[in-house]
Image (cartoon, helix red, strand yellow):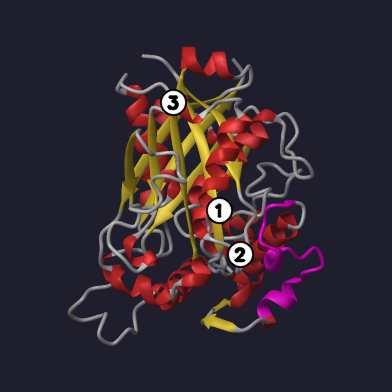
Amino acid sequence: MQRVGIVGFNQVKLYSDANYGRYEMIFEAVRGVLDSAGLKKKDISTVVSATNDYYDGRTISNALTVEPGGGYLTDESKVEMDGAHAVLYGLMRILSGNHKLAVVWGGSMASCFPYHSARLYETDPTWERPLAYVNDITSAGFQMRAYMEKFGVSAEDIAKIAVKNRKNAEKNPLALAEAQNPNLTVKDVLDSEIYANPVTELMVAQPCDGIAALLLAPEKQALKITDNPVWITGVGYSQETYYLGDRDLSISKSMELASNMAFNTAGVKDPINEIDVAELFEAYAHEELIFSEALGFAERGKGTSLNSEIGGDLPINPSGGALGGNPPCATGLIRIIEAVKQLRGEANGYQVKSAKKAIASGQIGMCAQNNILYVLEGGN
């Protein structure tokens, strides 16, 4: 079986309100990803998009995106999850042997829809939804509180993650401007508005407008397109039970199982020493700690002891992560793109030295109910 490589990528800058058309953003992202690889529309054999009917407020959310997304007169389909899940679909299409070049794009314009109201449809329709007491906002508070109380972690420890990622975002020109803050302090984070106690506003990955795209190709094709492909050597995914009350929110079982699958496929035996950089979709600052422990980078409850700065023991989210901007349906895809930049030595301003092997994750569902993880490697 041939390896599958990422041979191009492109991301539109993130905005809280892009103030220009969604279809123009899609065209810009997809046209840009083809240009980055020196390819043309006719070279595309399949297009996979990541959009969501609830976010768009209509059924068949990809109905009007086919043309600007490169799908006209081409095999085209949609994944109604995170963009990282769309990459899995594109990967499978390449591995089937039926396609030689897959465009994967995802994103939305959160400025045009009530994001948190739309996510209420993830809750139980009989007991939870009518009252709206359980939603993506309150569940974040449950998750952070469970983690803090089980392991004795302080709000200050979690605020440090928010400070780190927002300072990293300042180095990333594509990050959300409102998320970039090189002068942010732990006190600033703790004193920001209460989101869902104990989560504060600056611990939250702010929904925003954005589109991202990448190109997948089988090995022979990839090496013709670029002399610097990034190979997908492992992927894993897992989903936990639907009902929050049946889950231990202080840990992430789905990330643990997803990482076991991905690491086994890629032959990773000692993650903390083999992985050079991690781009993790942390919808809230505390999730970065929970994920780092699920990935085996630290013992449970000891994630705060890991030096995850750009020059640290294992850099996590040098781009700023999702706290640097969270465009629904694109955030996990951007994590993959940022990991690719690191492996290609193109993360200008926030490059991790000598990065050869990286991981990137996506998530959906309340309290990261579903996680998907990729192992990526550079070099021919």
Residue 101's disc is 3
Indicate yes or no whether the magenta region holds residue 181: yes
Say which element carries label 3.
Answer: loop
Per the rendered image, the range of residues in magenta is 172-190
Q: Label 3: how many residues lie within 10 Å, few (<14), some (14-19) or many (20+)?
A: many
Amino acid tagged 1: Met
Residue placed at 68% from the left, 65% from the top?
179
**Sequence order check: which comes first, mark 1 or mark 3?**
1
Which of the 4 image quadrants contains residue 353? top right
Report whether residue 48 is seen. Answer: yes
138 w.r.t. 229: above or below: below
Q: Nearer the viewer, residue 214 or 373?
A: 214
**Image quarter of the N terminus:** top left
**Image quarter of the C terminus:** top right
Residue placed at 39% from the left, 57% from the top?
364
The reply to whether the C-beta atoms of the residues labelled 2 and 1 are less than 8 Å apart is yes
In the displayed structure, does residue 42 sit left or right of residue 182? left
Residue placed at 25% from the left, 85% from the top?
130
Q: Nearer the viewer, residue 39 or 120?
A: 39
Amino acid tagged 3: Leu
Q: Residue under circle 2?
A: 18
Q: Residue under circle 1?
A: 25
Distance (Cα) linking label 2 and label 1? 9 Å
Say which element carries label 1.
Answer: helix
